[in-house]
Image: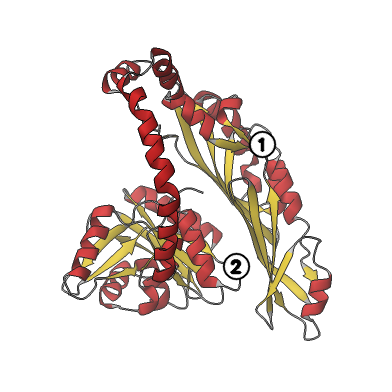
Amino acid sequence: MDRVPHTLLLDCPGTGRLLAFGLRWFALIGSDVPALARARGRRLRASHYVVGGAPATMAGYGRLRPQRRGGLRGRRASGRDAISIQAAAQLFALLYPDGGHSLLRLPDGRHWLVAAQRGTVLSQTDRVFASRDEALREQAQLLAQRPALPPREADAVWAAMLQAVDPAARLAPLPSRWAELPLVLRLFMGCIALSALAPPLWRALEALRPAREAPAPDLAEGRQARDDPYLALLRTTAAHAPSEITRLLASVGKLPIQVQGWALRRAQCLAEAQRWACSAAYVRVHPHATNQALHVLRPAGWGLSFQPMDAATLSWRMASGQAWLADSSLPTGLQVDTGLVVALQRLQPAFSAVVLAAAQPLPVPPAPMPSAAHEAASGQDGPRIHRRALSLRGPLRSFALLPDAISTARWSRLSLEIQPQPRPSLAASTLIAELQGELYEQE
């Protein structure tokens, strides 16, 4: 899962508070919301998070720059009041419980799009744009999907947010698993690890001293071959097999919409290292529905938890088919533009939204070589790998039309929502799915 981008922080003059913009928001499905929120934040490599929303629970994640985190720690250490960082989108949702949307021009010249519904931040918002035109395009797409959202006047929203303070909107530091352990247990485990590792580490260092003084030429050549940064990138970046979406849709397709007085509300599958972690939320809609009836009908091997009277969560895991980019034939950017993009354009009427971002270079890991060798290698041409973020939203049935040309993609999330439609159409249905991932290509 991609790490969250750095969060934009703006000061509220005269208040000692900061507003955080550009968080990434995800729905939390499960009974232990705090544990789920912390686990998701660690996978995203976030530094801070906030949880809010009811009845749907959403968590927003951000990452502060190291110098900003250091400044905050310094203020706490100096004995002054800890600075308060308020999630701007969560403040908006709390200020407008009936929902709404707004596009604000921030003091630094950028533009911020936010929307909330029933006190919950919408996941496709809380986004910061460099230009107003780009922000207006995203706002138009949002309103095409949710036309009932009322507009909120930008100046009034900004004035209200500068004055609002709510503990429910405050960003909290994300603790590591190690930090959550009791101090006594951490000290005990540290002493055990030190006593076990110190003797063999000392012996290994002693044995390496002669080799460090006179390294063999053949070992140096082998090390340079292993340290090729582009080859390392191809060997450590995984993509899903072309059949992955078919398998994933088949797994989600096992979910019944109505079963023994219980109704499906939403489901999602999140990509992990070698598998998918999936869950589905059900609510009790009939007075005679019981937990026992749902428990008996759950698929074999699936988990089921209750909350406890009127809601339940089905959970299951599915192995994912992956291959390294080094074993795949990457298309060129031109092949993507004239092949895959054309296929998506033809399928676009069957979806409510198809978004393909511009290609971005995949960061190359630094090669641990001596300076002279590194300078020699930097002059050589190597493959340039790029990625493009892809997001599709529409009826679940439309995803069966996706072309086989999507052969080098890494999918991150598939979500399903139940949205009753007064008039179903080609791009509107009761079962609405959203698929997110990224495509890989080469120059």
Label 1: which residue?
A: 241
Image coloring type = secondary structure
Residue 199 position in % (x across, y down):
41, 45
Residue 263 position in % (x across, y down):
74, 72
**Residue, x 40% and y 33% (percent of image)?**
365
- Taking depth in this image into account, of 145 and 90 the one nearest to the observer is 90
Above or below — where is 443 with respect to 159?
above
Q: In the current view of this chain or complex, which residue is farthest to the bottom?
A: 287
Label 2: which residue?
A: 29
Above or below — where is 252 with respect to 53?
above
User: Which amino acid is tagged 2?
Assistant: Ile
Q: What secondary structure is found at the residue carrying circle 1?
A: loop
User: Which amino acid is tagged 1?
Assistant: Ala
Q: Earlier in the sequence, mark 1 or mark 2?
A: 2
**Residue, x 72% and y 65% (percent of image)?**
303
Q: Is residue 95 left or right of residue 443?
A: left
**Residue, x 43% and y 62% (percent of image)?**
178
